[in-house]
Amino acid sequence: MVLNAKKHLLLALSFFIGVALAFISAQARAEILFEGYSKILSGGVHIGYSIVRYEYDNKKKEFVATSFTKTNELGGNLTESVKAYASDDLAPISYQYTTLIGNQTKVIDAKFEKGKMLATVKDGGKTQKIIKDLPKGTFISSFLAYVMLRSPTGIKQDSKYDYQAVMEEDAAIYKGSAVVKGEETFSGIKTMKVMNDFKDTKFISLINSRGEVFSTKAPAEGIATELVAQPSLATDKMTVPSGILKTLFGEIPTGQKNEIAEVAKKGSSK
């Protein structure tokens, strides 16, 4: 239950180990829109961390979402990552997903073309091919906050967004809804409170005007994430696999491209 709820909580924060090196140089030219470290909590106990980066490649006119998640023993020793690509209008292009729990590995490689999703799923020793129709307007779930931000109404009070999105962990399409329920502060910063319902999980997100997700909570499951100003506050004493991160992100992310880190930096310089 803990792991299942955690996966849905990381929609806008949301996960691919072994990225093709050909993509790394392209990423280096992309503009980083957001990069941050979040701690993952279960019942208030720190059980893991996630690293998320959103980029826009102006040359290719593509958005790139990269995320890495790791939990400790209390969180099931999970290692999970996603590398997702979307067009300028946030239509899905491709994504690669990897999860490792104990010795069990699952890898999904998906591409989108001609109104279809074509995915190869390798789960343990089994390989499955998936071909599905892609309803108009469907996007990869990692890009939810940006889809909301770029909608005609933007992110404002009482706005409701009904959508269909691809859940990276199982290469399936689900209906969801997000309702903006007014303002709330997080670490002294004004945010919008968003009530989300996706894949049988209800959770609350706090999002700023730039589409940055500061926190998520699933009250029924007791799972939460919180964006922090410094990597060490998220990783604590947990393993940080530098080799995997360099392959995935092209470098070790500093987690300083977000409003939480920016405000903390200004405060420390006074």
Image: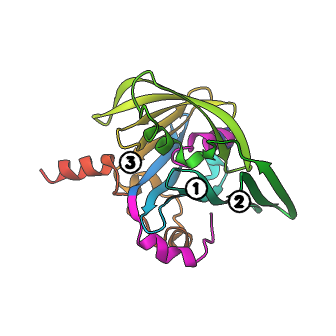
Dot 3 or dot 1: first in sequence order is 1
Q: Mark 1 = which residue?
A: 70
Q: Taking 254 as reference, is 131 left or right?
A: right
Which badge, 2 or 3, is on the more N-terminal residue?
Answer: 2
Residue 26 versus residue 9: which sits nearer the camera?
A: 26
Few, some or many residues within 10 Å of mark 2 (<14, 14–19, 20+): many
Please name the residue that numbered disc 2 is placed on: 110
Contact? badges 2 and 1 (CB < 8 Å): no
Give the left or right position of residue 220, taking residue 213 as reference. right
* Residue neighbourhood size for the residue with mark 3, other residues' Cα within 10 Å, grouped as few (<14), some (14–19), many (≥20): many
Total tally of numbered discs in the picture = 3
The span picked out in magenta is 4-32
| Residue toward you, 227 or 115 | 115
Which numbered mark, 2 or 3, is in the foreground of this view?
A: 2
State which mark lies toward you, 2 or 1.
2
For the point 51% across and 48% down, the residue is 13
**Three-letter amino acid code at the position of disc 2:** Ala
Give x and y (percent) for residue 138.
64, 43
Q: Amino acid at mark 1?
A: Lys
Q: Give whichever of discs 2 and 1 has the lower sequence position.
A: 1
Q: Report the amino acid beneath label 3.
A: Val
What residue is drawn where x is 27% and y is 51%? 262
- Circle 3 is placed at which residue position? 228
| Coordinates of residue 115 in the picture (x, y in percent) | 71, 51
**Residue 206 in view of the camera:** yes
Residue at disc 2, secondary structure: strand
Which corner quadrant holds the N terminus?
A: top right
